[in-house]
Amino acid sequence: MSKVGSESNPLRVAIVGSGPAGFYTVSNFLKHTDLCVEMDMFERLPTPFGLVRAGVAPDHQKYKTVTRAYDKSAQHPSFRFFGNVEYGTDITLADLKEHYHQVMFATGAPSDRNLGIPGEDLIGSHSATDFVAWYNGHPDCTGFEFDLSQENVAVIGLGNVAIDVARILCKTDAELMTTDMADYALDALRASKVKNVYVLGRRGPAQAAFTPPEIKEMGELEDADVFVPVAEVTLDPASVAELEASGDKNVKKNVAVIEEFSQRTVHDKSRHLTIRFLVSPTELIGEDGKVTAIRIVKNEAYADDKGNVKARATDEEEIIPVGMVFRSVGYRGAPVAEIPFDDYNGTIRNIEGRITDDTDNALPGMYVAGWIKRGPTGVIGTNKTDAQETVNHMAEDARSGVVFEGAKSAEAIVALLKSRKLDVITYSDWNKIDQHEVSKGEASNRPRVKLTNIDEMLEVLSS
Ligand code: NAP
Protein backbone atom coordinates (compact mmCIF):
# COMPACT_ATOMS: atom_id res chain seq x y z
CA MET A 1 0.00 0.00 0.00
CA SER A 2 1.34 3.46 -0.86
CA LYS A 3 2.17 6.04 1.80
CA VAL A 4 -0.71 7.47 3.88
CA GLY A 5 -1.55 10.96 2.61
CA SER A 6 -0.79 10.11 -1.04
CA GLU A 7 -3.44 10.31 -3.78
CA SER A 8 -3.83 6.55 -3.91
CA ASN A 9 -4.01 6.28 -0.09
CA PRO A 10 -5.51 9.52 1.24
CA LEU A 11 -5.18 10.32 4.95
CA ARG A 12 -8.70 9.64 6.25
CA VAL A 13 -9.67 11.81 9.21
CA ALA A 14 -12.84 11.65 11.32
CA ILE A 15 -13.79 14.87 13.13
CA VAL A 16 -16.32 14.51 15.92
CA GLY A 17 -18.14 17.81 16.51
CA SER A 18 -19.02 20.61 14.08
CA GLY A 19 -18.36 23.77 16.09
CA PRO A 20 -15.57 26.26 15.36
CA ALA A 21 -12.80 23.86 16.49
CA GLY A 22 -14.10 21.18 14.10
CA PHE A 23 -14.30 23.56 11.14
CA TYR A 24 -10.89 25.13 11.87
CA THR A 25 -9.49 21.58 11.83
CA VAL A 26 -10.76 21.30 8.25
CA SER A 27 -9.38 24.66 7.09
CA ASN A 28 -6.03 24.02 8.79
CA PHE A 29 -5.69 20.61 7.16
CA LEU A 30 -6.34 22.13 3.74
CA LYS A 31 -3.16 24.19 4.22
CA HIS A 32 -1.07 21.00 4.37
CA THR A 33 -1.03 20.71 0.60
CA ASP A 34 1.56 17.92 0.58
CA LEU A 35 -1.05 15.62 2.14
CA CYS A 36 -4.03 14.24 0.31
CA VAL A 37 -6.72 14.24 3.03
CA GLU A 38 -10.33 13.06 3.25
CA MET A 39 -12.24 14.54 6.17
CA ASP A 40 -15.59 13.35 7.51
CA MET A 41 -17.29 15.39 10.21
CA PHE A 42 -19.76 13.70 12.59
CA GLU A 43 -22.32 15.83 14.42
CA ARG A 44 -25.07 14.56 16.70
CA LEU A 45 -27.48 17.34 15.62
CA PRO A 46 -28.72 17.73 12.05
CA THR A 47 -27.33 21.29 12.08
CA PRO A 48 -23.64 22.26 12.19
CA PHE A 49 -21.70 25.05 13.96
CA GLY A 50 -22.08 24.16 17.67
CA LEU A 51 -22.11 27.24 19.88
CA VAL A 52 -22.07 29.60 16.89
CA ARG A 53 -25.65 28.48 16.31
CA ALA A 54 -26.70 27.64 19.86
CA GLY A 55 -24.45 29.75 22.10
CA VAL A 56 -23.53 33.04 20.45
CA ALA A 57 -26.12 35.65 21.44
CA PRO A 58 -28.96 35.93 18.91
CA ASP A 59 -28.61 39.74 18.94
CA HIS A 60 -24.91 39.45 17.99
CA GLN A 61 -25.35 38.28 14.41
CA LYS A 62 -22.04 39.75 13.31
CA TYR A 63 -20.20 37.04 15.29
CA LYS A 64 -22.14 34.41 13.39
CA THR A 65 -20.74 35.50 10.03
CA VAL A 66 -17.74 33.21 10.71
CA THR A 67 -19.94 30.43 9.34
CA ARG A 68 -19.28 31.80 5.83
CA ALA A 69 -15.70 30.60 6.21
CA TYR A 70 -16.95 27.24 7.51
CA ASP A 71 -19.25 26.97 4.45
CA LYS A 72 -16.24 27.54 2.25
CA SER A 73 -14.32 24.70 3.93
CA ALA A 74 -17.39 22.48 3.59
CA GLN A 75 -17.43 23.02 -0.19
CA HIS A 76 -14.02 21.38 -0.53
CA PRO A 77 -14.31 17.98 -2.26
CA SER A 78 -12.32 16.33 0.53
CA PHE A 79 -15.00 17.18 3.13
CA ARG A 80 -18.21 15.38 4.06
CA PHE A 81 -20.74 16.13 6.80
CA PHE A 82 -22.61 13.36 8.63
CA GLY A 83 -25.17 15.20 10.73
CA ASN A 84 -27.66 13.55 13.09
CA VAL A 85 -25.05 10.87 13.92
CA GLU A 86 -24.05 10.66 17.55
CA TYR A 87 -20.62 9.45 18.60
CA GLY A 88 -20.95 6.89 21.40
CA THR A 89 -24.45 5.84 20.33
CA ASP A 90 -24.78 5.65 16.55
CA ILE A 91 -21.08 5.21 15.99
CA THR A 92 -18.33 3.95 18.28
CA LEU A 93 -14.60 4.44 18.67
CA ALA A 94 -14.05 0.95 17.21
CA ASP A 95 -16.04 1.98 14.09
CA LEU A 96 -13.95 5.13 13.66
CA LYS A 97 -10.66 3.28 14.16
CA GLU A 98 -11.72 0.82 11.47
CA HIS A 99 -12.63 3.49 8.91
CA TYR A 100 -10.11 6.27 9.52
CA HIS A 101 -6.39 6.83 10.03
CA GLN A 102 -6.94 9.54 12.61
CA VAL A 103 -9.81 10.65 14.86
CA MET A 104 -10.18 14.16 16.20
CA PHE A 105 -12.61 15.16 18.98
CA ALA A 106 -13.96 18.70 18.98
CA THR A 107 -16.97 18.17 21.18
CA GLY A 108 -16.83 21.45 23.14
CA ALA A 109 -17.95 21.98 26.72
CA PRO A 110 -21.66 21.13 26.90
CA SER A 111 -22.04 21.28 30.68
CA ASP A 112 -21.65 24.04 33.29
CA ARG A 113 -19.81 24.59 36.56
CA ASN A 114 -21.57 24.53 39.91
CA LEU A 115 -21.41 27.15 42.64
CA GLY A 116 -21.41 24.64 45.47
CA ILE A 117 -23.66 26.70 47.75
CA PRO A 118 -26.85 25.76 49.63
CA GLY A 119 -30.05 26.25 47.67
CA GLU A 120 -28.42 25.78 44.28
CA ASP A 121 -31.01 23.13 43.37
CA LEU A 122 -34.09 25.18 44.27
CA ILE A 123 -36.72 25.76 41.61
CA GLY A 124 -35.83 29.02 39.88
CA SER A 125 -32.08 28.40 40.08
CA HIS A 126 -30.79 27.77 36.56
CA SER A 127 -27.57 27.40 34.71
CA ALA A 128 -27.11 30.38 32.39
CA THR A 129 -25.92 27.98 29.69
CA ASP A 130 -29.34 26.24 29.77
CA PHE A 131 -31.09 29.60 29.31
CA VAL A 132 -28.75 30.47 26.42
CA ALA A 133 -29.35 27.09 24.73
CA TRP A 134 -33.11 27.51 25.27
CA TYR A 135 -33.42 30.98 23.75
CA ASN A 136 -31.14 29.89 20.90
CA GLY A 137 -33.46 26.98 20.08
CA HIS A 138 -31.15 24.05 20.83
CA PRO A 139 -33.30 20.96 20.17
CA ASP A 140 -32.34 19.47 23.58
CA CYS A 141 -33.60 22.53 25.44
CA THR A 142 -36.88 23.56 23.83
CA GLY A 143 -38.89 22.15 26.74
CA PHE A 144 -37.03 24.07 29.45
CA GLU A 145 -39.10 26.47 31.53
CA PHE A 146 -38.01 29.81 33.00
CA ASP A 147 -40.40 31.74 35.21
CA LEU A 148 -40.26 35.13 33.55
CA SER A 149 -43.15 36.34 35.70
CA GLN A 150 -40.51 37.16 38.33
CA GLU A 151 -39.62 40.84 38.72
CA ASN A 152 -36.17 40.36 40.25
CA VAL A 153 -33.47 38.16 38.78
CA ALA A 154 -29.81 37.60 39.68
CA VAL A 155 -27.08 36.57 37.28
CA ILE A 156 -23.93 35.28 39.01
CA GLY A 157 -20.59 35.82 37.27
CA LEU A 158 -18.86 38.54 35.28
CA GLY A 159 -18.12 36.70 32.03
CA ASN A 160 -19.57 37.37 28.59
CA VAL A 161 -22.24 34.73 29.11
CA ALA A 162 -23.51 36.55 32.22
CA ILE A 163 -23.56 39.76 30.18
CA ASP A 164 -25.42 38.05 27.32
CA VAL A 165 -28.06 36.68 29.67
CA ALA A 166 -28.54 39.99 31.50
CA ARG A 167 -28.79 41.88 28.21
CA ILE A 168 -31.36 39.48 26.74
CA LEU A 169 -33.44 39.83 29.93
CA CYS A 170 -33.28 43.63 29.62
CA LYS A 171 -34.02 44.03 25.93
CA THR A 172 -37.38 45.16 24.60
CA ASP A 173 -39.50 43.11 22.25
CA ALA A 174 -38.52 45.44 19.40
CA GLU A 175 -34.84 44.85 20.12
CA LEU A 176 -35.32 41.07 20.23
CA MET A 177 -37.55 40.93 17.14
CA THR A 178 -34.55 41.51 14.88
CA THR A 179 -32.77 38.39 16.16
CA ASP A 180 -32.86 34.69 15.26
CA MET A 181 -33.94 33.77 18.79
CA ALA A 182 -36.33 30.78 18.92
CA ASP A 183 -39.94 31.85 18.40
CA TYR A 184 -41.08 30.30 21.71
CA ALA A 185 -38.39 32.31 23.55
CA LEU A 186 -39.46 35.51 21.82
CA ASP A 187 -43.05 34.88 22.96
CA ALA A 188 -41.93 34.14 26.54
CA LEU A 189 -39.68 37.20 26.72
CA ARG A 190 -42.42 39.41 25.24
CA ALA A 191 -44.58 38.48 28.26
CA SER A 192 -41.67 38.88 30.70
CA LYS A 193 -42.27 40.79 33.93
CA VAL A 194 -38.57 41.05 34.75
CA LYS A 195 -37.79 44.56 36.05
CA ASN A 196 -34.56 44.31 38.05
CA VAL A 197 -31.55 42.32 36.92
CA TYR A 198 -28.57 42.05 39.28
CA VAL A 199 -25.25 40.92 37.83
CA LEU A 200 -23.06 39.79 40.72
CA GLY A 201 -19.27 39.57 40.41
CA ARG A 202 -17.00 38.16 43.09
CA ARG A 203 -14.00 40.34 42.16
CA GLY A 204 -13.63 43.96 41.01
CA PRO A 205 -14.03 45.71 37.64
CA ALA A 206 -10.33 45.17 36.82
CA GLN A 207 -10.78 41.38 37.05
CA ALA A 208 -14.06 41.11 35.15
CA ALA A 209 -14.00 38.44 32.42
CA PHE A 210 -16.31 40.37 30.05
CA THR A 211 -14.89 42.19 27.01
CA PRO A 212 -15.19 45.97 26.34
CA PRO A 213 -17.75 45.94 23.48
CA GLU A 214 -20.02 43.62 25.49
CA ILE A 215 -19.99 45.72 28.68
CA LYS A 216 -20.29 49.02 26.76
CA GLU A 217 -23.47 47.76 25.12
CA MET A 218 -25.09 47.44 28.56
CA GLY A 219 -25.19 51.22 28.73
CA GLU A 220 -26.97 51.53 25.40
CA LEU A 221 -30.12 49.50 25.98
CA GLU A 222 -33.37 50.98 24.74
CA ASP A 223 -35.44 50.56 27.88
CA ALA A 224 -33.04 49.53 30.67
CA ASP A 225 -30.86 51.79 32.80
CA VAL A 226 -27.55 50.53 34.01
CA PHE A 227 -26.58 51.16 37.61
CA VAL A 228 -23.24 50.49 39.33
CA PRO A 229 -22.72 51.41 43.02
CA VAL A 230 -19.86 53.94 43.19
CA ALA A 231 -18.40 52.29 46.30
CA GLU A 232 -17.78 49.05 44.39
CA VAL A 233 -15.99 50.71 41.48
CA THR A 234 -13.00 52.37 43.13
CA LEU A 235 -10.03 50.14 42.43
CA ASP A 236 -8.27 48.65 45.47
CA PRO A 237 -4.44 49.04 45.66
CA ALA A 238 -3.86 45.42 44.54
CA SER A 239 -5.93 45.98 41.38
CA VAL A 240 -4.18 49.29 40.64
CA ALA A 241 -0.80 47.53 40.92
CA GLU A 242 -1.98 44.60 38.77
CA LEU A 243 -3.31 46.94 36.08
CA GLU A 244 -0.16 49.07 36.07
CA ALA A 245 1.99 45.98 35.71
CA SER A 246 -0.08 44.41 32.91
CA GLY A 247 -1.08 47.61 31.08
CA ASP A 248 -3.93 45.51 29.63
CA LYS A 249 -5.88 47.80 27.30
CA ASN A 250 -9.08 45.77 27.51
CA VAL A 251 -9.04 45.89 31.30
CA LYS A 252 -8.51 49.66 31.17
CA LYS A 253 -11.46 49.98 28.78
CA ASN A 254 -13.65 47.80 31.02
CA VAL A 255 -12.76 49.88 34.08
CA ALA A 256 -13.46 53.15 32.24
CA VAL A 257 -16.87 51.91 31.07
CA ILE A 258 -17.81 50.75 34.58
CA GLU A 259 -16.68 54.08 36.07
CA GLU A 260 -18.83 55.93 33.56
CA PHE A 261 -21.83 53.73 34.45
CA SER A 262 -21.34 54.53 38.14
CA GLN A 263 -21.57 58.26 37.39
CA ARG A 264 -24.94 58.04 35.67
CA THR A 265 -27.67 59.87 37.52
CA VAL A 266 -30.69 59.56 35.26
CA HIS A 267 -32.55 56.33 35.80
CA ASP A 268 -35.93 56.62 34.15
CA LYS A 269 -36.29 53.52 32.01
CA SER A 270 -38.61 50.59 32.77
CA ARG A 271 -35.90 48.08 33.57
CA HIS A 272 -33.02 48.39 35.93
CA LEU A 273 -29.75 46.55 35.43
CA THR A 274 -27.46 46.64 38.46
CA ILE A 275 -23.87 45.43 38.15
CA ARG A 276 -22.23 44.64 41.48
CA PHE A 277 -18.58 43.94 42.25
CA LEU A 278 -16.77 42.22 45.13
CA VAL A 279 -19.82 40.23 46.22
CA SER A 280 -20.18 36.44 46.36
CA PRO A 281 -23.36 34.40 46.68
CA THR A 282 -23.32 32.22 49.80
CA GLU A 283 -26.86 30.82 49.71
CA LEU A 284 -29.99 30.73 47.61
CA ILE A 285 -32.87 31.17 50.01
CA GLY A 286 -36.16 29.47 49.21
CA GLU A 287 -39.76 29.00 50.23
CA ASP A 288 -41.78 25.93 49.21
CA GLY A 289 -38.77 24.74 47.20
CA LYS A 290 -38.54 27.95 45.14
CA VAL A 291 -35.90 30.66 45.14
CA THR A 292 -37.03 33.82 46.91
CA ALA A 293 -33.74 35.57 47.64
CA ILE A 294 -30.00 35.38 47.38
CA ARG A 295 -27.65 35.88 50.29
CA ILE A 296 -24.40 37.55 49.32
CA VAL A 297 -21.28 38.39 51.26
CA LYS A 298 -19.14 41.41 50.52
CA ASN A 299 -15.57 40.60 49.54
CA GLU A 300 -12.31 42.41 49.85
CA ALA A 301 -9.61 42.18 47.20
CA TYR A 302 -6.08 41.08 48.01
CA ALA A 303 -3.01 40.08 46.03
CA ASP A 304 -1.82 36.48 46.49
CA ASP A 305 1.88 35.65 46.63
CA LYS A 306 2.08 35.75 42.81
CA GLY A 307 0.43 39.18 42.69
CA ASN A 308 -2.89 37.85 41.36
CA VAL A 309 -5.87 39.70 42.71
CA LYS A 310 -8.24 37.40 44.59
CA ALA A 311 -11.37 38.00 46.65
CA ARG A 312 -11.97 37.00 50.27
CA ALA A 313 -15.16 37.28 52.22
CA THR A 314 -15.71 39.97 54.86
CA ASP A 315 -18.38 39.48 57.53
CA GLU A 316 -20.76 41.92 55.83
CA GLU A 317 -23.80 40.16 54.37
CA GLU A 318 -26.76 41.29 52.33
CA ILE A 319 -29.95 39.63 51.13
CA ILE A 320 -31.39 40.53 47.72
CA PRO A 321 -34.95 39.35 47.07
CA VAL A 322 -34.99 37.53 43.69
CA GLY A 323 -37.33 34.95 42.17
CA MET A 324 -34.87 33.53 39.66
CA VAL A 325 -31.10 33.02 39.57
CA PHE A 326 -28.82 32.27 36.64
CA ARG A 327 -25.49 30.72 37.58
CA SER A 328 -23.02 31.90 34.96
CA VAL A 329 -19.67 30.79 36.30
CA GLY A 330 -18.35 29.01 33.23
CA TYR A 331 -18.96 26.06 30.95
CA ARG A 332 -17.51 22.63 31.67
CA GLY A 333 -16.47 19.80 29.35
CA ALA A 334 -18.21 16.42 29.61
CA PRO A 335 -16.52 13.02 29.32
CA VAL A 336 -16.55 11.51 25.83
CA ALA A 337 -17.19 7.75 25.54
CA GLU A 338 -14.01 5.65 25.67
CA ILE A 339 -11.68 8.68 25.74
CA PRO A 340 -9.38 9.51 28.72
CA PHE A 341 -10.86 12.42 30.66
CA ASP A 342 -9.24 14.87 33.05
CA ASP A 343 -12.05 15.34 35.55
CA TYR A 344 -10.36 18.20 37.39
CA ASN A 345 -10.12 20.40 34.29
CA GLY A 346 -13.15 18.98 32.46
CA THR A 347 -11.04 18.26 29.36
CA ILE A 348 -9.88 15.26 27.34
CA ARG A 349 -6.39 14.33 28.50
CA ASN A 350 -3.93 15.65 25.93
CA ILE A 351 -0.60 17.22 25.25
CA GLU A 352 -0.88 19.93 22.59
CA GLY A 353 -3.87 18.16 21.06
CA ARG A 354 -2.47 14.62 21.08
CA ILE A 355 -4.75 12.54 23.33
CA THR A 356 -2.81 10.84 26.09
CA ASP A 357 -3.41 8.07 28.59
CA ASP A 358 -3.26 8.52 32.37
CA THR A 359 0.54 8.43 32.26
CA ASP A 360 0.84 11.10 29.55
CA ASN A 361 1.66 8.71 26.72
CA ALA A 362 0.18 9.83 23.39
CA LEU A 363 -2.46 7.47 22.00
CA PRO A 364 -1.57 7.13 18.30
CA GLY A 365 -4.23 8.40 15.89
CA MET A 366 -6.28 10.22 18.57
CA TYR A 367 -6.53 14.00 18.79
CA VAL A 368 -8.56 16.81 20.34
CA ALA A 369 -9.20 20.51 19.65
CA GLY A 370 -11.22 23.42 21.07
CA TRP A 371 -12.83 23.75 24.50
CA ILE A 372 -12.65 20.01 25.22
CA LYS A 373 -8.87 20.33 24.70
CA ARG A 374 -8.03 23.53 26.58
CA GLY A 375 -11.14 24.34 28.65
CA PRO A 376 -13.94 26.87 28.02
CA THR A 377 -11.92 30.01 27.39
CA GLY A 378 -11.40 32.48 24.59
CA VAL A 379 -13.51 33.76 21.71
CA ILE A 380 -14.47 31.92 18.51
CA GLY A 381 -11.22 32.87 16.77
CA THR A 382 -9.12 31.39 19.59
CA ASN A 383 -10.10 27.98 18.21
CA LYS A 384 -8.28 28.70 14.97
CA THR A 385 -4.80 28.67 16.52
CA ASP A 386 -5.88 25.93 18.91
CA ALA A 387 -6.91 23.67 16.00
CA GLN A 388 -3.81 24.65 14.08
CA GLU A 389 -1.59 23.28 16.85
CA THR A 390 -3.43 19.94 16.82
CA VAL A 391 -3.58 19.69 13.03
CA ASN A 392 0.17 20.35 12.75
CA HIS A 393 0.74 17.36 15.05
CA MET A 394 -1.75 15.25 13.07
CA ALA A 395 0.04 16.08 9.82
CA GLU A 396 3.43 15.43 11.39
CA ASP A 397 2.26 12.04 12.71
CA ALA A 398 0.69 11.12 9.36
CA ARG A 399 3.93 11.91 7.56
CA SER A 400 5.79 9.59 9.90
CA GLY A 401 3.14 6.89 9.50
CA VAL A 402 1.75 7.08 13.06
CA VAL A 403 -1.89 6.32 12.16
CA PHE A 404 -4.52 3.62 12.59
CA GLU A 405 -3.72 0.88 10.13
CA GLY A 406 -6.02 -0.28 7.36
CA ALA A 407 -8.61 2.50 7.25
CA LYS A 408 -11.52 1.37 5.11
CA SER A 409 -12.67 3.28 2.02
CA ALA A 410 -14.76 6.47 1.99
CA GLU A 411 -17.73 4.40 0.76
CA ALA A 412 -17.46 1.87 3.60
CA ILE A 413 -18.49 4.35 6.30
CA VAL A 414 -21.51 5.43 4.24
CA ALA A 415 -22.52 1.78 3.94
CA LEU A 416 -22.08 1.31 7.70
CA LEU A 417 -24.28 4.31 8.54
CA LYS A 418 -26.87 3.09 6.04
CA SER A 419 -26.86 -0.37 7.61
CA ARG A 420 -27.66 1.28 10.95
CA LYS A 421 -30.72 2.95 9.39
CA LEU A 422 -29.76 6.45 10.51
CA ASP A 423 -31.31 9.62 9.07
CA VAL A 424 -27.93 11.02 8.08
CA ILE A 425 -27.91 14.72 7.19
CA THR A 426 -25.42 15.79 4.53
CA TYR A 427 -24.08 19.32 4.11
CA SER A 428 -26.42 19.87 1.17
CA ASP A 429 -29.31 18.77 3.42
CA TRP A 430 -28.14 21.34 5.95
CA ASN A 431 -28.04 23.96 3.15
CA LYS A 432 -31.74 23.19 2.52
CA ILE A 433 -32.59 23.59 6.22
CA ASP A 434 -30.57 26.80 6.26
CA GLN A 435 -32.37 28.21 3.22
CA HIS A 436 -35.73 27.25 4.71
CA GLU A 437 -34.93 29.11 7.95
CA VAL A 438 -33.51 32.16 6.19
CA SER A 439 -36.47 32.48 3.83
CA LYS A 440 -38.91 32.19 6.75
CA GLY A 441 -36.95 34.99 8.46
CA GLU A 442 -37.11 37.29 5.43
CA ALA A 443 -40.86 37.71 5.81
CA SER A 444 -40.39 39.23 9.28
CA ASN A 445 -37.05 40.98 8.66
CA ARG A 446 -35.15 38.53 10.82
CA PRO A 447 -31.89 36.74 10.03
CA ARG A 448 -33.75 33.41 10.14
CA VAL A 449 -36.59 31.62 11.91
CA LYS A 450 -34.95 28.61 13.48
CA LEU A 451 -36.25 25.07 13.34
CA THR A 452 -35.83 23.85 16.88
CA ASN A 453 -37.07 20.30 16.55
CA ILE A 454 -35.23 17.49 14.78
CA ASP A 455 -38.42 15.92 13.33
CA GLU A 456 -39.35 19.30 11.83
CA MET A 457 -35.93 19.49 10.20
CA LEU A 458 -36.32 16.00 8.72
CA GLU A 459 -39.80 16.93 7.49
CA VAL A 460 -38.46 19.98 5.66
CA LEU A 461 -35.98 17.70 3.92
CA SER A 462 -38.55 15.09 2.96
CA SER A 463 -41.04 17.65 1.61
P1 NAP B 1 -15.88 33.05 31.96
O1 NAP B 1 -15.46 34.06 30.97
O2 NAP B 1 -14.88 32.05 32.42
O3 NAP B 1 -16.49 33.84 33.23
C1 NAP B 1 -16.87 33.15 34.38
C2 NAP B 1 -17.20 34.17 35.47
O4 NAP B 1 -17.70 33.44 36.57
C3 NAP B 1 -15.99 34.95 35.96
O5 NAP B 1 -16.39 36.26 36.20
C4 NAP B 1 -15.65 34.23 37.27
O6 NAP B 1 -15.04 35.07 38.23
C5 NAP B 1 -17.03 33.88 37.75
N1 NAP B 1 -17.01 32.82 38.74
C6 NAP B 1 -16.42 31.60 38.66
N2 NAP B 1 -16.66 30.89 39.76
C7 NAP B 1 -17.40 31.68 40.58
C8 NAP B 1 -17.97 31.51 41.86
N3 NAP B 1 -17.82 30.37 42.54
N4 NAP B 1 -18.67 32.52 42.40
C9 NAP B 1 -18.85 33.68 41.72
N5 NAP B 1 -18.34 33.90 40.49
C10 NAP B 1 -17.63 32.91 39.93
O7 NAP B 1 -17.09 32.15 31.42
P2 NAP B 1 -18.33 32.45 30.46
O8 NAP B 1 -18.93 33.78 30.70
O9 NAP B 1 -19.17 31.24 30.57
O10 NAP B 1 -17.68 32.48 29.01
C11 NAP B 1 -17.01 31.34 28.47
C12 NAP B 1 -16.14 31.80 27.29
O11 NAP B 1 -16.98 32.15 26.19
C13 NAP B 1 -15.31 33.01 27.60
O12 NAP B 1 -14.05 32.90 27.01
C14 NAP B 1 -16.11 34.13 26.98
O13 NAP B 1 -15.35 35.27 26.64
C15 NAP B 1 -16.66 33.44 25.75
N6 NAP B 1 -17.86 34.16 25.27
C16 NAP B 1 -17.65 35.23 24.46
C17 NAP B 1 -18.72 35.97 24.06
C18 NAP B 1 -18.49 37.17 23.19
O14 NAP B 1 -17.40 37.31 22.65
N7 NAP B 1 -19.45 38.04 23.05
C19 NAP B 1 -20.01 35.67 24.48
C20 NAP B 1 -20.20 34.57 25.34
C21 NAP B 1 -19.09 33.83 25.74
P3 NAP B 1 -13.48 35.04 38.51
O15 NAP B 1 -12.86 35.81 37.39
O16 NAP B 1 -13.35 35.67 39.83
O17 NAP B 1 -13.08 33.59 38.49
Image (cartoon, rainbow, N blue to C red):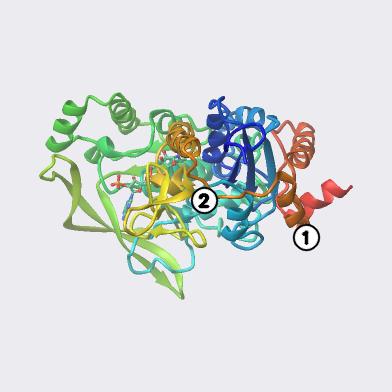
Quarter the N terminus occupies: top right
Q: Position of residue 11 (x, y in %)?
A: 59, 39
Question: Which residue is depicted at the point 63% across and 39% down?
Answer: 39
Near-viewer residue (7 or 47): 7
- Residue found farthest to the front: 1
Question: Which residue is depicted at the point 43% across and 36% down?
Answer: 386
Question: The residue tagged with tag 2: helix, strand or loop?
Answer: loop
Label 2, residues with CA under 10 Å away: few <14, some 14-19, many ≥20: many
Mark 1 sits on what residue? 419
In this picture, is 214 found above or below 85? above
Residue 41 appears left or right of 460: left
- The image quadrant that residue 430 belongs to is top right
- The image quadrant that residue 427 belongs to is top right
In this picture, is 403 found above or below 448? below
Q: Position of residue 213 (x, y in %)?
A: 43, 28
Mark 2 sits on what residue? 194
Label 1, residues with CA under 10 Å away: few <14, some 14-19, many ≥20: few
Query: Can residue 58 be seen at all in this image of the molecule?
Result: yes
Q: Amino acid at mark 2?
A: Val
Query: Can residue 192 be seen at all in this image of the molecule?
Result: no
Residue 157 tag number = none
